[in-house]
Image (spheres, helix red, strand yellow):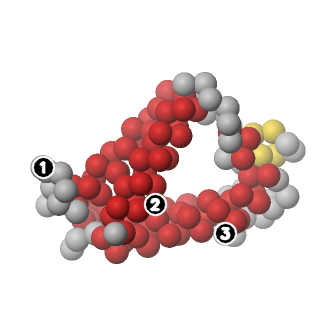
């Protein structure tokens, strides 16, 4: 069940990033940290597609780890734990614009980050850790 939810999350995240890379704008205003009403960075199409590919790869890794694909790697558990650590670090944040311990809390992104993104990253981290094999 946890693996299925993780695959759903990573597949959906990959699809959303493909939509944005293709020029879609819906939701884009709430996913980038801001300073003085301006995004801190403007991701390129290539970097957005790279993120989509990485999310899809993690979905495939989770499927392989669950034994539902034709492949499984002996090192997949360690890789999944590493990815879990990255999501845990994202949930904690960088202490300025994102994560549970951010200082800037008055932007649209910051509100979404507090209510949705950081808790979701923490949940994904826990889920990945739970399914990782030793």
Q: Residue at x 50, y 70 (%)?
A: 123
Q: What percent of the width, then of the height, locates residue 60?
A: 29, 49
Q: Which residue is mark 3?
A: 100
Assign a secondary structure to mark 1: loop
For the question of whether residue 43 can be seen, the reply is: yes
Q: Residue at x 62, y 29 (%)?
A: 24
Callouts 1 and 2 close, C-beta under 8 Å? no
* Dot placed on the residue nearer the N-terminal end, 3 or 2: 2
Earlier residue among tags 1 and 2: 1
Q: Is residue 94 visible?
A: no
* Residue placed most toward the observer, 44 or 58: 58
Q: CA distance from mark 1 to mark 2?
A: 27 Å
Residue 106, which numbered label?
none
- Residue 101 falls in which quadrant of the image? bottom right
Residues packed near mark 1 inside 10 Å, few (<14), some (14 to 19) or many (20 plus): few
Determine which residue is flagged by label 2. Answer: 86
């Amino acid at each position: 069940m946890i693996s299925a939810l993780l695959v759903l999350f990573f597949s959906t995240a990959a699809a959303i990033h493909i939509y944005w890379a293709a020029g879609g704008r819906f939701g884009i205003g709430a996913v980038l940290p801001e300073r003085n009403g301006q995004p801190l960075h403007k991701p390129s199409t290539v970097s957005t597609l790279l993120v989509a590919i990485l999310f899809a790869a993690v979905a495939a890794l989770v499927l392989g780890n669950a034994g539902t694909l034709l492949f499984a790697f002996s090192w997949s558990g360690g890789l999944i734990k590493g990815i879990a650590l990255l999501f845990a670090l994202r949930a904690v944040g960088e202490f300025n614009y994102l994560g549970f311990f951010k200082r800037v809390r008055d932007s649209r992104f910051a509100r979404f980050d507090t209510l949705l993104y950081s808790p979701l990253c923490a949940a994904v981290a826990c889920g990945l850790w739970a399914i990782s094999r030793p």
